[in-house]
Structure formats: C-alpha cells, structure tokens
C-alpha cells in the first residue's frame, strides 16, 4: 500500500494514518505495530505514535489478548452520521441511466421499508411503453426479484420476523418447476443477484441485485424489469453482471468496501502454446468435469445453473442431464449413474434420470454451498464447501464415507480444487480467497489429512487458483480464475508452463478423451459484464487442449 503524494504541507502524517486505518480494516485479525510497520514500510516508532493517537481518539482499539489493533467504535459513529446524509437516488442516477441503455428496458431503484419494497426512482423503457412500476409503488418483499434480492442478504431469523411462513414457501422458476424458498435464497446469495418471472400472459420478468449499507445490511435493490416476452431467462442472466456492478459501485460510493467485479486485462498468448478448441455451452459456473470412458462423454456441473451437463467431444455439443439444487458432480458409477452433491446431500442419478438420496449432510451447512469435489486414489470422495457469500473462515473440507459425510478440515475461506500425488500420500487443496495451493500429508488407509502448509502462491496479477488436477507425472495443472489462463507447476510449486485462454474465468480441469491426454477445462460467465462477455464470448463453454500435439 502506498500513500498518495500530496502537495499540502503537513499532510504526510495524515496520509500515513489513513494508510494504517485502511490496512487494519482489511485484516481479519487484530494487527500489531510490527506487522503494520513491515507491511507499510514505516519506522516502528512512527507507527507507534500514530496508532497511539488514533487509539486515544477512538479510531482504533487495542485487543488485550493479542496486543493488536482493530478499528474503533468512533469510526462506526462517523459512518453512521455519514449514512444519515446518503442520497441513494443521487448515487444511483447514472447507474439507472446506464442499465436502461444496456437493456433498453425499465431500470428500477427501490428501498426496503419494513416488510415491503418501495420504488423510489426509475427510468422508462426505450421501447416507448410506459412502465408498470410507478415511483412510490409498494409491494411485499416476496416474491418479486427486487424484494428477494434484499431477502437473500438477510439471515433466517430476520426472514422469519418478516414472515414466519416464508421458509415454507416455494419459488416458481421459468421452466415451470418450483424450488423451496431456502434454496432460492442460497442461489441468489451465491450468484449475487435474483431473477424472477411472473406467470400469466402479460408476465413481467425482472433481475435485481441488493445494495448494502456500511455494515453489509441490505437496504435497497437495483435492477431491470420488462415483459417476459422480451426478457428471457438467458437475457436476464446476461444482464445480471452489469446490475451487480452497479449495485456494488453504489454500495462502494456509499461507504462499503466491495469493489468492481471486472477481471484483469486480457494477456497476450504464450509463445508456441497448444491450440485451444471449444465445445459451446453457457454455464454460469462450470465445474467438476468427469470423463466417462464408458460413454465417451464428458460430464460436468453448472454449479450456479444449477444443472448436470453431458458433453460430446466429437459432435461438439452439450445437453442437460438433470437439474438438481446448487451443487457439484462427484463422480461416475460403473453402471453409468452419476453421484451428485447439493445442499440436501449426496444423490445417485440413474441413467433413467431417477434420483436417490444416498447420504445426508452434517448440520451447520445450511448457509454453505459445495465448491468442488476430489477423488482420492482409493476412489473416495472429498468435498470442499464455502459460505454462499464467501465469508472468510467458513469453508471446509468434507470426507464422504459409508458412515456419512464428516468435516475433515475447517476454518478455510474459499477452498476449491483437490488433487493427490501419484502415490496418494500427499494431498493438494486450493484456497482461492488467499490465492494459495496448500499441501498436506495424506494417510490413504485412514483417509486422514495432516497439517496444511503453503505449496504455491499466486500474485493478484496472475488470477486466483481454482480447480486443479495432477498429471501422470504428478505435476499440478491449475485453472486461474480471472487470469485468462491455466498453469502447470513443477514439484516445488513454481509455474513452469502457462497456457493463455480466450476466457477470463477458467474454473476446473480433468484429463480424458480417447488417449487420456486431452485436458478439459470448464469455465464461467457468472458476474462478467457485457463488455467482458463481448470480448470473451466463449465464457461458460468447455475448452479442450490436446497435450500430445
């Protein structure tokens, strides 16, 4: 972190104090004088004088147990006073204009008022038909997209206070199916937005994202609404990234620290890299690819779709096998069935598409979702889970056995891919939030994971590691989310080869194909803006690389 230079005399100490406050605000734990000085490149005596002054004025407080500093309550008092003067209509004005230009439909801003959503500003559709959403209109938070966007950021206790019957309600989907209210909220929280299409001949379709205050509480929502005849489900999902971006920028301008959702700039291709081929698909978050030698097909999960897909490499097409709850594909059974894990448990999906719940989940995973699945050398399944809102410290590694599903490691943030070395005695775990690949000893007989330690770390400019797979020599291949690339690591954890891709968000990998030397790469289009999607239209497809070439 580097303070901006100022021509104002005497501003240097102020800028240093602001840098210290910002650094402490981003730390999950109290921070001592030494680490602050080392990270910010300041002399310890200077840091000590500044933090002492900030503590005296209530901007910082000392944690007696760790002897580190955290933010003081006076900052929250000032933030509360600032929020009293926030004019969301003014902050959202340009965003409403932009969303109307992008969608050509009506854009809407509304506030939560108790159990209702009130429209406080809007822009009319460019199609010349006046909106059916007038300013001042009040409607219940459920079941519209705007109200549900707000509900998705509330905890179950608050939702029960709004309406005790809500947890027992269901939400209709555009394909005629209905899902439980809780699953709809999990999907909305994980996606960062809500889509809803009303029923009837003149149905209205909407997509909305929540706006949070400085404490992360949902206070409003912004989005787009119009006739379902013009706003298909695919169109709603395509509009979502720009709506999320607007909601987050409004939030950021109003005091929240969440920043833009844009990936890094597209890098230049690596010299002499292999050809990348594409099998078209539109997954929101493709993951857990599994090659079936029996069917000569690739199977994968669209975690956010959610759906399980089959992909014919030779024909170059994909189709939906089943539409479960939000989850991941574990593996393929010898009889052709699929094992899938979602918020209710592990399900066996037969070739006839019948489903059987074969394992239930441990309690405490209601606010979590599965992010990946690995298969150890003995064929056992391991799942990684994370908070649907990606909250730090709420991720875990779960072991699947005949006795049930149990927690093997916890306290992670966004754990993702899992892989083992050829002898099965070392496990690798991706911790995406920290841009790390961790390593631990693994006991194949007891199926026990030892202490995790860093194996490879990636710079912000490289993207975040996501899915991983080990090749026949035991080298790891890793998908770099927002990095437009995959990389191969040597046995010391260093990048020894990189392949640039035509998409910013590769998510997972597996080997397969007739020779076993085709690398399949799943990708994502979730939360990508229209600008990025126009630059990377293959986002959401399955990419293949023939490593024998």
Image (spheres, grey):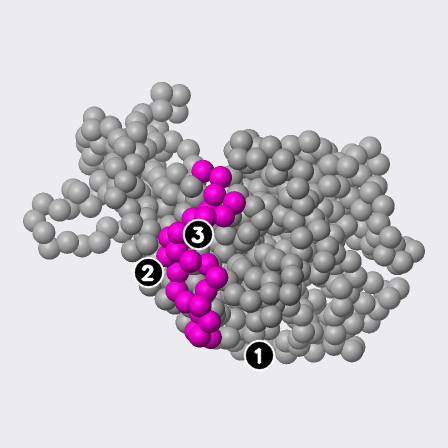
Of marks 1 and 3, the one in the foreground: 3
Q: Where in the figure is residue 427, as x and y percent of width and height?
A: 68, 45
Which quadrant holds the C terminus?
Answer: bottom right
Q: Residue at x 39, y 38 (%)?
A: 215
Quadrant of the rendered image containing residue 168: top right
Residue 468 highlighted magenta (yes or no): no
From the viewer's perspective, is 417 left or right of 454?
right
Secondary structure category for the residue under label 2: helix
- For the residue carrying disc 1, how many other residues have a C-alpha within 10 Å: few (<14), some (14-19), or many (20+)? few
Of marks 2 and 3, the one in the foreground: 3
Tell me the chief SS of the magenta region. Answer: loop
Say which mark, if any, is on residue 137.
3
Residue range of the region highlighted in magenta in the rendering: 114-141
* Residue tagged 1: 272
Q: Residue at x 44, y 52 (%)?
A: 137
Q: Earlier in the sequence, mark 1 or mark 3?
A: 3
Q: Is residue 469 visible?
A: no
Say which mark, if any, is on residue 93.
2
Q: Earlier in the sequence, mark 1 or mark 2?
A: 2
Label 1 and label 3: CA atoms lie apart by 60 Å
């Amino acid at each position: 972190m580097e303070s901006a230079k100022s021509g104002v005399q005497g501003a240097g100490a102020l800028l240093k104090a602001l840098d210290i406050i910002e650094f402490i605000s981003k730390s999950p734990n109290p921070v001592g004088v030494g680490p602050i000085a080392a990270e910010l490149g300041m002399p310890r005596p200077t840091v000590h004088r500044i933090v002492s002054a900030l503590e005296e004025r209530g901007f910082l407080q000392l944690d007696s147990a760790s002897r580190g500093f955290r933010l003081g309550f006076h900052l929250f008092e000032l933030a509360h006073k600032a929020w009293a003067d926030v004019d969301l209509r003014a902050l959202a004005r340009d965003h409403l204009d932009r969303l109307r230009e992008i969608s050509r439909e009506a854009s809407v801003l509304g506030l939560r008022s108790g159990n209702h959503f009130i429209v406080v500003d809007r822009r009319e559709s460019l199609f010349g038909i006046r909106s059916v959403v007038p300013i001042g209109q009040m409607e219940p938070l459920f079941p519209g997209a705007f109200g549900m966007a707000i509900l998705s950021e509330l905890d179950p206790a608050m939702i029960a206070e709004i309406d005790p019957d809500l947890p027992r309600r269901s939400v209709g989907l555009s394909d005629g199916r209905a899902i439980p209210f809780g699953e709809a909220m999990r999907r909305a929280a994980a996606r960062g937005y809500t889509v809803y299409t009303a029923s009837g001949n003149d149905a209205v379709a909407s997509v909305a994202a929540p706006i949070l205050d400085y404490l992360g509480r949902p206070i409003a929502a912004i989005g787009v609404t119009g006739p379902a005849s013009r706003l298909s489900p695919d169109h709603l999902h395509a509009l979502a990234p720009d709506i999320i971006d607007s909601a987050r920028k409004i939030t950021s301008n109003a005091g929240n620290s969440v920043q833009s959702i844009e990936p890094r700039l597209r890098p230049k291709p690596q010299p002499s890299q292999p050809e990348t081929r594409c099998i078209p698909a539109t997954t929101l978050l493709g993951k857990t690819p599994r090659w079936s030698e029996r069917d000569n097909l690739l199977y994968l999960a669209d975690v956010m779709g959610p759906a399980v897909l089959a992909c014919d490499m030779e024909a170059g097409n994909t189709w939906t096998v089943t539409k479960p709850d939000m989850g991941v594909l574990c593996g393929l059974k010898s009889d052709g069935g699929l094992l899938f894990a979602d918020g209710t448990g592990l399900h066996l999906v037969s070739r006839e598409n019948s489903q059987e719940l074969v394992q239930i989940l441990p309690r405490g995973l209601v606010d979590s979702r599965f992010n990946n699945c690995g298969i150890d050398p003995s064929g056992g399944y391991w799942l990684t889970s994370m908070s649907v809102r990606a909250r730090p410290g709420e991720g875990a590694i779960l072991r699947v056995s005949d006795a049930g599903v149990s927690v093997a490691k916890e306290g992670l943030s966004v754990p993702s891919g899992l892989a083992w070395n050829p002898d099965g005695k070392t496990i690798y775990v991706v911790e995406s939030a920290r841009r790390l690949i961790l390593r631990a000893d693994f006991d194949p007989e007891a199926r026990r994971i030892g202490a995790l330690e860093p194996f490879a770390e990636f710079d912000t400019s490289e993207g975040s590691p996501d899915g991983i797979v080990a090749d026949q020599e035991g080298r790891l291949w890793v998908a770099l989310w927002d990095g437009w690339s995959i990389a191969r690591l040597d046995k010391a954890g260093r990048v020894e080869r990189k392949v640039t891709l035509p998409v910013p968000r590769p998510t997972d990998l597996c080997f397969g194909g007739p020779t076993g030397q085709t690398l399949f790469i799943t990708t994502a289009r979730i939360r990508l803006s229209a600008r990025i999607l126009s630059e990377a239209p293959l986002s959401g497809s399955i990419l293949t690389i023939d490593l024998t070439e």
